[in-house]
Image (tube, helix red, strand yellow):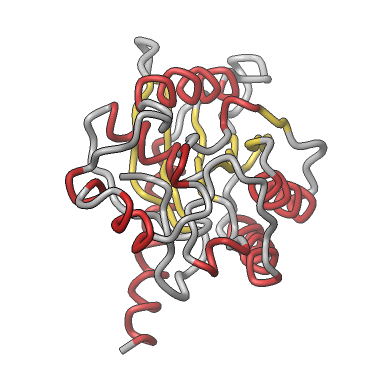
């Protein structure tokens, strides 16, 4: 049933948060997708389109902040993509956590999906048969190498500790986009899957300076299927 599914999802959410906090280092981040946007509801690929959050998306952001507080997750800073749907999600969470200004970084924006921007999946299939099935993209689509290069650098920069090494380790919350998170994980050759709103994963920088992708994390329970800008 839907109730059982949501209960199981909440259990996985709590377990992953508690596991994460036990193992996080001074260079750690929770990297999540933004709240529900207007085009998420319509099933459209967004890319660089600067779409807005829905009322439900804003409520998701508030719920995410409440769960972080309830679970004692020590968020130290909040960073976000410069696109409105991610930036506003981050601002709502930061406000509820009592954190100051959100750090906005253009390198965290969604993948440029070229001619697929504004299209639904059946429209993409009609114009580019079997591209989604075969994970192919049109020439104007931003390459995975470029997405990974900019996003990984941004994550490294935002995870640089602002405290002295002797002080307790804290976490950075990063609000970005499904296409970015999924592309980074694929380029790192770790498991990738479709992401709901306010879902993502844990990233750290290990002692050798390597970016490491960790467990999936969901800050709210999913309400319905959602479109991801990723092939």
Q: Nearer the viewer, residue 99 or 5?
A: 5
> Is residue 187 left or right of 59 when viewed as pictured?
left
Could you tell me which quadrant the C terminus lies in?
A: top left
Q: Is residue 131 above or below residue 12?
A: above
Left-right relation of 79 to 7: right
| Residue at 20%, 51% in the rendered image | 130
Q: Position of residue 116 (x, y in %)?
A: 44, 46
From this viewpoint, which residue is outermost toward the top? 208
Q: Is residue 64 above or below residue 139?
A: below
**Vertical position of residue 182 compared to residue 88: above or below:** above
In the rendered structure, the answer to whether residue 51 lies left or right of residue 201 reads right
- Residue 173: % across, % down: 59, 40
What x and y, as percent, mark residue 56?
Answer: 64, 71
Report x, y in % for residue 86: 64, 46
Quadrant position of residue 76: top right
Q: Nearer the viewer, residue 96 or 19?
A: 96
Q: Residue at x 51, y 59 (%)?
A: 197
Q: Quadrant of the N terminus?
A: bottom left
Circle count: 0
The quadrant in which residue 92 appears is bottom right
Comparing 230 with 128, the one in front is: 128
- Residue occupying image coordinates x 36% and y 86%: 2
Q: Nearer the viewer, residue 167 or 15?
A: 15
Residue at image point 47% right, 65% down: 43
């Amino acid at each position: 049933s839907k109730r059982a599914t949501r209960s199981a999802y909440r259990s996985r959410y709590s377990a992953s948060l508690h596991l994460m906090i036990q193992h996080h280092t001074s260079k750690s981040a929770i990297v999540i997708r933004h709240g529900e946007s207007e085009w998420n509801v319509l099933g459209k690929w967004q890319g660089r389109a600067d779409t807005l959050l829905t009322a439900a998306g804003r409520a998701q952001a508030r719920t995410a902040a409440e769960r972080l507080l309830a679970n004692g997750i020590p968020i130290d800073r909040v960073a976000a993509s410069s696109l409105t749907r991610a930036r506003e999600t981050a601002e709502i969470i930061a406000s509820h956590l009592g954190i100051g200004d959100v750090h906005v970084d253009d390198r965290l924006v969604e993948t440029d999906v070229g001619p697929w921007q504004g299209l639904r999946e059946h429209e993409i299939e009609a114009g580019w048969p079997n591209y989604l099935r075969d994970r192919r993209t049109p020439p104007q689509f931003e390459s995975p190498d470029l997405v990974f290069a900019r996003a990984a650098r941004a994550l490294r920069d935002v995870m640089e500790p602002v405290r002295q090494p002797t002080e307790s380790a804290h976490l950075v919350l990063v609000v970005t986009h499904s296409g970015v998170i999924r592309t980074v994980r694929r380029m790192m050759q770790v498991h990738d899957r479709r992401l709901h709103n306010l879902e993502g994963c844990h990233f750290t920088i290990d002692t050798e300076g390597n970016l490491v992708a960790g467990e999936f994390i969901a800050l709210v329970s999913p309400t319905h299927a959602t479109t991801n800008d990723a092939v």
